[in-house]
Amino acid sequence: MGKQPAALRLEAVRERLDAACAVAGRSRTDVLLIAVSKTHPPEAIAALVQAGIHDFGENRVQELQQKYPEVPDVRWHLIGQLQQNKARHAVAMASLIHGLDRRSLAQRLSKEAVQQNVHCRALVQVNIDDDPNKAGCQVSEARDLVAYATTLPNLTIEGLMTIPIAPASGVDPNAAARPTFAALRELRDTVADDFPHVSQLSMGMSADIEAAIAEGATMVRVGTALFGARGTTPWQKDQL
């Protein structure tokens, strides 16, 4: 029997990661592949688990709540913008929160982690391109946000995250995104001078993982290349 579609897509993505790491002179083990599963059903996630993926990313807390009991023994990453009223659920379910972008959210995550007697791991999301359509703190705010969050109990900032502006039609996504990724790496290096534990770089998606790896990404968030086209609405259990 031939390989299943999920295994074939994963093989293709891994080949891209291997090639990009080779070009950059980096070890493949230094880059974590996160499969972005938003809108896709648990059976599609389970197929990738069987193929060897154990880290999955969701944008919405509500959708993660639906899937969390359906797919056990995986690590969930919350990669979308997080509202404070969803912080309790995010802390309970997510292995890593990629979208910390303000002091008030840091306070809430810390408070919820203390109450649940757990440790919350997070990345500071930075709006490198100053895109009004993207979440994230300003570049000038990133260091102070890291410094503030570091003082809070049960909360650890492990790195930075960004989402580049979508490229114009006909423009190579890797070429368009690389300056954004380079800027995030430079910011991480500056912040890490004072906070060495801030080492992770979550950047790069299906179209631009080569540029992300070239600029030092330690986590890439890949959806379409692994799952195929995204659905138009969040997945819900028992939906028709």
Image (spheres, rainbow, N blue to C red):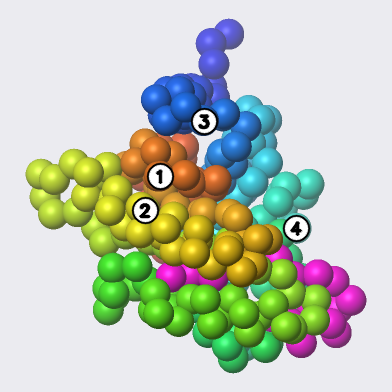
Residue 160 is left or right of residue 131, and the answer is right
**Marks 4 and 2: which is nearer the front?**
2
> Residue 76 lies in what quarter of the image?
bottom right
Residue at x-position 43% and y-position 70%: 126
Q: Residues within 10 Å of mark 1 (few under 14, many from 20)?
A: many
Q: Earlier in the sequence, mark 3 or mark 4?
A: 3
Residue at 85% x, 84% y is 115
Query: Where is mark 2, residue-wise?
Result: 181
Inspect this view and state whether residue 64 appears: no
| Res. 1 mark | none
Q: Amino acid at mark 1?
A: Glu
Q: CA distance from mark 3 to mark 2?
A: 16 Å
The residue tagged 1 is 215
Q: Measuring 39% from the left and 74% from the top, which residue is drawn there? A: 139
- Frontmost of labels 4 and 1 is 1
- Mark 4 and mark 1 lie on one chain; the one further toward the N terminus is 4
Q: Residue furthest top?
A: 1
What residue type is disc 2 on?
Phe
Residue position for label 3: 26
Tell me if I can see residue 169 in this picture: yes
* Numbered disc in front, either 3 or 4: 3
**Residue 230 horizontal side relative to residue 54, left or right:** left
| Magenta stretch in the rendered image | 109-126
Q: Which of the labelled discs sits on residue 69, or is there none?
A: 4
**Between 171 and 93, which is closer to the camera in this rendering?**
171
Kind of residue at badge 4:
Pro
Q: Nearer the viewer, residue 212 or 183?
A: 183
